[in-house]
Image (tube, grey):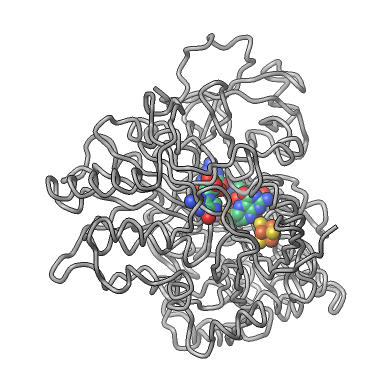
Amino acid sequence: MGEIRRVKGCCPLDCQDTCAWVAEVEDGRVVAVRGARDHPFTRGVLCAKVNDYEARTYAPDRLLHPLRRAGPKGSGRFERISWDEAVATIAARFGEIAARHGPEALLPHRYLGSMGVVQRRAPMRLFHALGASRLAGGICSVAAQAVAGEGFPLGFDPEDMAESRLVLLWGLNLLTTCHHHWHFVQEARRRHGARVVCLDPVRTRTARQCDEHVALRPGSDAALAAGMARVMLEEGLADLDYARAACADLDAFAALVAPWTPERTAEACGVAAETVLRLAREFAAARPAVIRAGVGPQQSAQGEAVVRLWHALAILGGHWRHRGGGVLVIATPGLEDMRADRADLIPAGASPRALDMARLGAILTDPAPDPPVKGLMVWGTNPAVVQPDAGRVRRGLAREDLFTVVLEHFLTDTARYADIVLPSTTQLEHFDILGAWGHQYITVNLPAIAPLGEAKSHGEVMRLLARRMGLGHPAMRESDEEIAASALPPGVSLEALREAGWVKRHKPPPRLEGAGLRLVRGDAVPLPAAPPAAGMLRLLTPKAHFFLNSSFANQPRQQRAEGRPTLHMAPADAAARGLGDGEAVRLRNAQGAIGATLRVSDAVPAGVVVLPGKWWSPPEEEGAVANLLCPPAWSPGGQPAYNDVFVEVIGAAAAPPAGAPRGASP
Ligand SMILES: Nc1nc2c(c(=O)[nH]1)N[C@H]1C(S)=C(S)[C@@H](COP(=O)(O)OP(=O)(O)OC[C@H]3O[C@@H](n4cnc5c(=O)[nH]c(N)nc54)[C@H](O)[C@@H]3O)O[C@H]1N2
Ligand SMILES: Nc1nc2c(c(=O)[nH]1)N[C@H]1C(S)=C(S)[C@@H](COP(=O)(O)OP(=O)(O)OC[C@H]3O[C@@H](n4cnc5c(=O)[nH]c(N)nc54)[C@H](O)[C@@H]3O)O[C@H]1N2
Ligand code: SF4
Ligand SMILES: [Mo]
């Protein structure tokens, strides 16, 4: 046995926890990745998805060479080509498109598949230098970001949750999606006897570990918050000095929530009036309380209203005055990673249009923007699965006149539509640095091994393409380390990071006094959307325990652990439809139809069905791509409404045979 070499790194995935890890290398091969023991957040453990990350790197179906399409788009038929040919083809096609239709006919489309500065940002330099269409919007917590734009903070240091006296886990399945936060929740229990309440329509893994589970109706969060606020105001429990110092429209807010009596709130939310009263009183009495909120309730056309009402509650309670109090949706260490995109490379005088990434289906199909998008490069996201109206995204990707390049680890549903697929390195094979969206550490990732096959980092892809396209700015020649370093905030050096593995950036909690915040905007207390037809059920599509969005859904260990695509339904709804546990069912609506296996369960309320996970749909089998059922709907701020979906559920035997509508795969 060779000696074990230990290499500092971190998990690249789009998760609140950004764990620091140690890769163990023996004879040139990574044999294990382990959570860094001395990292205050990781505390020695990774999660059930990632604790064998090396299996992703060495997966037999990993992409290790450039590919060119050799069959219809979507079919997954490709032939191997050299890097030289791939780069020459992309440079020629992108060049032609820019010359013929203008550079705005080129569109980068990326998300957080890897949160690394290099992997996420480097290819943007090409598009900026060309004057391509810019990318705007997002597909995750857009509602919270939109409300942050109004001046409300996104959160505070989650380690301070240990000082909370009451923790409301509001639409957050913490033990599945960010389990490292649980330590600080438990600390609050140990130190202060804090109570932990889960507000979620579903009795999740997290709900089962809390002191109380409030199973409110999906989409009724704004009503519950309004009802709680009214109790606080009526009973004189609100910290009015603080609320007046922070807000410009407290009286208007009081008028807005005045009709939300406990009885009316209870009816809207499907909980007892007594629960509304008690929650409000406890929330007002705690010094402090935290609303630790997730994305589930945001992913609705009413997302911003919900976020604003969370803030209203925290402000009324005066919770921001104390360490560990307030609203916590997102925490960051303030890495300045936008800088690594180099928007300053946009040619002088040009002002390229910005297209909302969450509307890719609409952008690629009729009526197309002018000029239409003719050249697309996708990295770090799987839009054929994760975007709303995924059927339309697939129709767009299938366009013969669209030239698509996808940078990937695997032949995902999206990569199957590419003209050229480029193999990316995994986190064990490249240098990168990461910020975070759930804590305040910046973390370094050192390469543990050389790239496998012909995989390349996204910095290298950028450099190769820039050279071939004649883009000569020095920024196009920067090394991966230089690209990463360009995002570091003052006072943090790459050397220090390499040495320590991570640095914490302590940021003081936000101060809202004098902020002049406005709590009331438009229809501020929306009610749950109503089903479009009798008998339709609301479909929630939360995160799967063993997948990270659609990542890992192709890996055997995670697949086995997650099982088959499963639709959870309340016993009364199953009985009303004559459906039994374990039965094959079909979900359908005007958008499309998919199949799943039924699980009859009292963990979900009547009227609601739950299909966890984002599943692949390779051509040879029908996958449960839930977003084929998701209509094109967004909040005013651009939040995709993934959870405002209604479906009919029938036994698969009663369903029309194959060939029936299933999204729009050609
Ligand atoms: N295992 C795992 N971990 C992940 C991910 C993953 O895919 N798998 N994804 C990562 C990403 S990208 C993100 S954004 C985070 C998300 O982390 P979370 O916010 O925890 O994720 P979700 O599962 O989307 O939503 C949380 C809960 O919201 C509930 N919910 C749905 N609608 C409503 C509603 O109207 N009101 C209320 N109160 N609750 C509602 C759902 O039942 C669900 O339990 O997790 C990250 N971590
Ligand atoms: N119905 C429904 N839809 C949803 C959600 C939901 O809860 N319900 N959640 C939404 C949310 S919160 C989010 S954040 C999005 C997530 O959507 P995405 O960001 O698209 O997440 P993934 O599906 O994991 O796709 C990431 C892709 O990046 C690839 N990748 C990872 N690392 C690298 C790398 O280093 N290089 C390259 N080239 N590729 C890499 C992975 O292989 C994977 O295919 O989905 C959204 N869509
Ligand atoms: S997915 Fe999240 S919890 Fe799992 S290892 Fe990565 S950062 Fe940690
Ligand atoms: Mo997300």
In percent of width and height, residue 95 lies at 20, 50
In percent of width and height, residue 241 lies at 55, 87
Q: Is residue 216 visible?
A: no
Q: Is residue 648 above or below residue 408?
A: above
Q: Quadrant of residue 72?
A: top left
Horizontal placement of 250 versus 333: left or right?
left
Q: Is residue 530 above or below residue 635?
A: above
The picture quadrant for ligand 3 comes to bottom right
Residue at 43 percent across and 31 percent down: it is 79
Q: Quadrant of residue 346?
A: bottom left
Residue at 51 percent across and 51 percent down: it is 455
Q: Is residue 641 above or below residue 27?
A: above
Horizontal placement of 64 versus 89: left or right?
right
Front residue of this view, candidates 617 and 480 = 480
Front residue of this view, candidates 233 and 622 = 622
Residue at 20 percent across and 53 percent down: it is 104
Horizontal placement of 497 versus 423: left or right?
right
Front residue of this view, candidates 251 and 597 = 597
Q: Is residue 491 above or below residue 586?
A: below
Q: Is residue 87 visible?
A: yes
In percent of width and height, residue 569 lies at 70, 31
Front residue of this view, candidates 337 and 163 = 337
Q: Quadrant of the C terminus?
A: top left
Q: Quadrant of the N terminus?
A: bottom right
Horizontal placement of 154 versus 205: left or right?
left
In percent of width and height, residue 415 lies at 45, 38
User: Number of callouts in the render?
Assistant: 0
